[in-house]
Image (cartoon, helix red, strand yellow):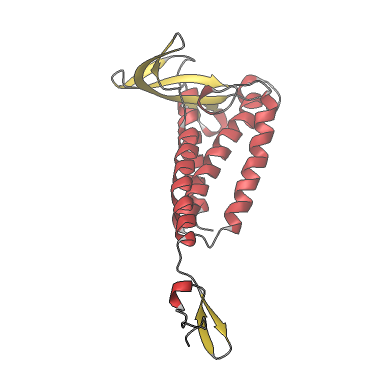
Amino acid sequence: MKVLFVTLFVVIADQVTKLLIRGVQIPALGINIHGMPLYSSIPVIGNFLRFTYIENPGMAFGIDFGWKSFFAIFSIFASMAIFIYLYKVRNESKPVRFSLALILGGAIGNLIDRVFYGPLFDGTPLFHGRVVDFIDFKFFDIHLFGYNFSRFPVFNIADASVTVGVVMLLIFHGRRLHENETQPAANVQTGDNLVSTDPEANPREPDGSTKG
């Protein structure tokens, strides 16, 4: 399935940007990237777009309900389910498969953080890693329930890929279902005659019999 190259691209782009932000040292390969200090920010487009390095132990966009291992294990099963479904719909339209490939790439990207970043960087067990987030957008100032929301939750390329993929899937898969529902009534072969399942296509004689 060529569409899996989209998944591979998302995973590589996600991991490369995370390692550049976090920093990584691999002496054997001569790699020594210092990265950014945790919770520090670098302006990209003034205060509107910044790179802000945070680590998220929970779900996308900083959502955390605890149970660190749960999110990693859930991501594994979710990724497997998406891959299987992507294979089953391999004959579907390209936009639908592209959407699923984006979702799969995002899921795998964050899964790598949760599974491997703990033992690699923090000395914690497998499945206890924290996801690196860094894309920080200014949001509309909203006052809600006594709280002020001025910036969008910090996210990463994997989060963005999943979000875009889900939106595209809702649009194109929903459109496909609508097209199937509005298909013209099929003709049914009966003996030597073709009889349409559309009542208006088979006018009746005054005695109630059907023409043809």
Number of numbered discs overlaid on the protein picture: 0
Image-based side of 118 in relation to 97, left or right: right
For the point 66% across and 20% down, the residue is: 66
Quick one: which residue is furthest to the left in this view? 46
The image quarter containing residue 46 is: top left
Q: Position of residue 114 (x, y in %)?
A: 62, 29
Instruction: Between residue 5 and residue 67, name the one nearer to us.
Output: 67
Quick one: which residue is furthest to the front in this view? 207
For the point 55% across and 91% down, the residue is: 192
Quadrant, the N terminus: bottom right
Q: Position of residue 198 (x, y in %)?
A: 48, 72
Residue 189 higher or lower than 93, as above or below: below
Instruction: Between residue 76 and residue 25, name the one nearer to us.
Output: 76
For the point 47% across and 46% down, the residue is: 170
Residue 4 higher or lower than 120, as above or below: below
Q: Position of residue 27 (x, y in %)?
A: 55, 28
Quick one: which residue is furthest to the bottom in this view? 192
Residue 153 higher or lower than 15, as above or below: above
Q: Position of residue 204 (x, y in %)?
A: 47, 80
For the point 50% across and 26% down, the residue is: 61
Instruction: Between residue 71 and residue 210, name the one nearer to us.
Output: 210
Quick one: which residue is furthest to the top in this view? 146
The image quarter containing residue 57 is: top right
